[in-house]
Image (spheres, rainbow, N blue to C red):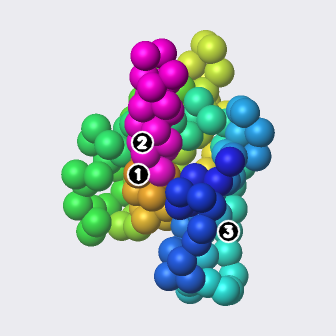
């Protein structure tokens, strides 16, 4: 399933594309200069992507774009830090809370879009289950 737009349609002005690779992994593609062009992409376990998106919705989006780097913050299954004004570094943590060695260096805009798209998808899933249930 493609989270970028309902029906899988993309605008050439969209810089971020969210694609579900399988039921446990999403791929976040960010086009640095817009489409077509160079892009970066990250495959993120769905539970970590949801936690990054939830952190963004609850507190991350309120952080001023010009803010300098910050201390790492644990949020559910991820450890998050701001690196400069425009990038967020997130690392998954194991069940004991130990962070992975590598993580995802995501542009602020990509995290914002990820949060929007996962929220839209979750709302659509709830609406569909409400209709099916009754």
Question: Can residue 85 be found in the magenta stretch?
Answer: no
Q: Nearer the viewer, mark 2 or mark 3?
A: 2
**121 horizontally vs 112: left or right:** right
Residue 119 badge: 2
Q: Which residue is mark 1?
A: 116
Q: Nearer the viewer, mark 3 or mark 1?
A: 1
Q: What x and y, as percent, mark residue 3?
A: 58, 53
Q: Which span of residues is magenta-colored?
A: 117-134
Q: Which residue is mark 3?
A: 40
Question: Can residue 121 be found in the magenta stretch?
Answer: yes
**129 horizontally vs 100: left or right:** left
Is 30 located above or below residue 37 in the figure?
above
The structure residue drawn at horizontal position 56% and vertical position 40%, both measured from the top left corner, is 49
Image quarter of residue 31? bottom right
Q: Which element type, helix, strand or loop, lies under badge 3?
A: strand
Q: What x and y, as percent, mark residue 24?
A: 71, 32
Q: Are marks 1 and 2 in contact (CB under 8 Å)?
A: yes
Is 61 located above or below residue 78 in the figure?
below
């Amino acid at each position: 399933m493609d989270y970028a737009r309902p029906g899988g349609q993309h605008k050439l002005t969209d810089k971020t594309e969210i694609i579900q690779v399988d039921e446990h992994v999403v791929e976040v593609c960010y086009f640095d200069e817009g489409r077509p062009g160079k892009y970066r992409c990250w495959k993120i376990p769905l539970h970590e992507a949801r936690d990054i998106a939830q952190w963004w919705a609850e507190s991350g989006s309120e952080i001023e774009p010009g803010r300098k780097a910050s201390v790492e913050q644990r949020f559910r299954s991820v450890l998050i830090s701001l690196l400069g004004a425009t990038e967020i570094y997130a690392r998954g943590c194991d069940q004991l809370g130990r962070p992975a060695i590598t993580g995802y260096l995501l542009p602020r805009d990509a995290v914002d879009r990820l949060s929007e798209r996962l929220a839209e998808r979750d709302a659509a899933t709830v609406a569909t289950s409400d209709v099916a249930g009754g």
